[in-house]
Amino acid sequence: MNVRHERPSPDLSLRVAAPLLVGLGDGTVVRVHQWSLRALYSPEFDGRDLAGASLSIPFQGVQVYFPVTLVPGEAPGEVLLQDLTGRQRETLALFYRNLLSGRMAATADLITALDTPVDLVPPEETAAERRAATAASPARAPRVVANVLAYVLLAALVFGWLGSLAYARLDALPLVNARVAQPAALLVAPGSAIVAEVVAAEGVEVPAGALLMRLQAPELQRMLDDLEGPLIRAEAALAAVDRRIGAHAARRDAARAAAPQGAEAFDTGVSAAPGDYHDIRLRLEAELRDRERDLRMLELEAARLRDALATLEIRAPEAGRVVALRVAPAQAVAAGTPLLLFEGAGRRTVEGWLADDFADAVWPGMRATVRLRREGRLVALPGRVVAAESDGAAPRAAAIRVQVALEGLSAEETRALLAIGAPVRAWLARDLWRGWLGLAPAGG
């Protein structure tokens, strides 16, 4: 245990009210009633010459004098005690402590204070000793320069290494659960059906729109076939009403001439009596609208069934290949059943997640690094962020899904290098130094 004794700071000393006598150089004696180990307080000090002062401490009827150096303080009537020797400080402190504790100072304590050793100065080297000690040493200036350069180089190495580690940790944003993304689309059954034919084979490249699989839905086909008769009858009924309307319109001139209310009233198109020309015309037009509505509803239902049957032909959404078949011919499937996994011709990417705290620290075009095993060796590949979107299904700890594309690799190379779902390590470069220099972020 290392014990160190230190003298309390005089600035923290309390003032005591006890008489002290201060003799000034001009012979004036100032009676001080307030003082501390730091300063004396009396309005009589204002404007006085403080040079050659001496301080008198009363001790059981005997005054102990010693010279002091006084300088004016900041407050009115304040003078500061400066450059007290060890004996002077101990003597004044003894009187000060006794006043605070309320007991009388013993003679032995005063003698001890007066005998306190003062600054012990070690003996100095002689000139001959100094010359002998430095005789074999190089010149002072080159030695100082060499030492300074050595320390500067050492500091640069240490702090440069530590600084680079700290910067790398601050600049990198690691992605959580990074893995090779699956660019394949899962094609599902549009409804209940039976697999009639599987056209495409796994791993074979096909163009966009190529037929991959054909399904059959007997129930939909039966419903469409059942609509053929009603459609024919509805078309015939509509044609019959149309013919009747034409025949009735051919009798307009005769009906106008024989109209009892006159030609002008006939031309208004308002029926004057049940069964007249305009009454029959209105009933035929209403029947025509009904037949048209019936035919339109049947045609809409037939179109819906044809569209549903057309969706049973599963075609390639883009140029690519079938990764995996999930069904076999003659297999019955329900709506939403996975049929096949189709991978487009694009490059495989890497995806990972970030916490939403970094929503303002990621952008498309941001530099990234992906590290993975390639033929048993760890390799680091450069990449760029191509998408960053909120993932509502992810927890708060990883709420932003980030997609990274590798640079300099073709689609075939990414397929050979990146296995779908393979785990990788990926982190984003924030390029903090650009922000510190006021530059725009790379790619942002």
Image (cartoon, helix red, strand yellow):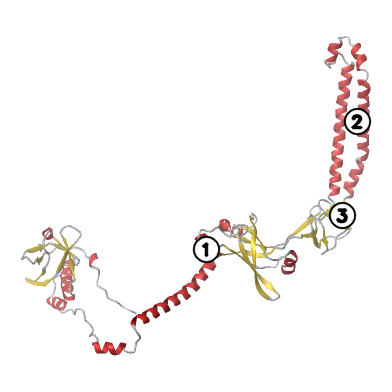
Q: Earlier in the sequence, mark 2 or mark 1?
A: 2
Q: CA distance from mark 3 to mark 1?
A: 57 Å
First in residue order: circle 2 vs circle 3: 3
Residue at (76, 57) in percent of width and height: 185
Q: Would you call the spot at circle 3 few (<14 residues within 10 Å), some (14-19), or many (20 or more)?
A: some
Instruction: Residue under label 1, please give it.
Output: 433
Can you tell which mark lies on residue 238? 2
Disc nearest the viewer among 3 and 1: 1
Residue to which mark 3 is pinned:
214
Q: Mark 3–mark 1 contact, CB under 8 Å?
A: no
Question: Which kind of residue does numbered mark 1 sit on?
Answer: Trp
Element under disc 1: helix
Quadrant of the rendering where the C terminus is positioned = bottom right
**Rendering coords of residue 162 (x, y %):** 49, 72
Q: Is residue 409 above or below residue 266?
A: below
- Front position in the image: 233 or 410: 410
**CA gap, disc 2 to disc 1?**
79 Å
- The mark closer to the camera, 2 or 1, is 1
Mark 3 vs mark 1: which is more N-terminal?
3
Locate residue 83: give its quadrant. bottom left
Residue farthest toward the left in the current orientation of the protein: 27
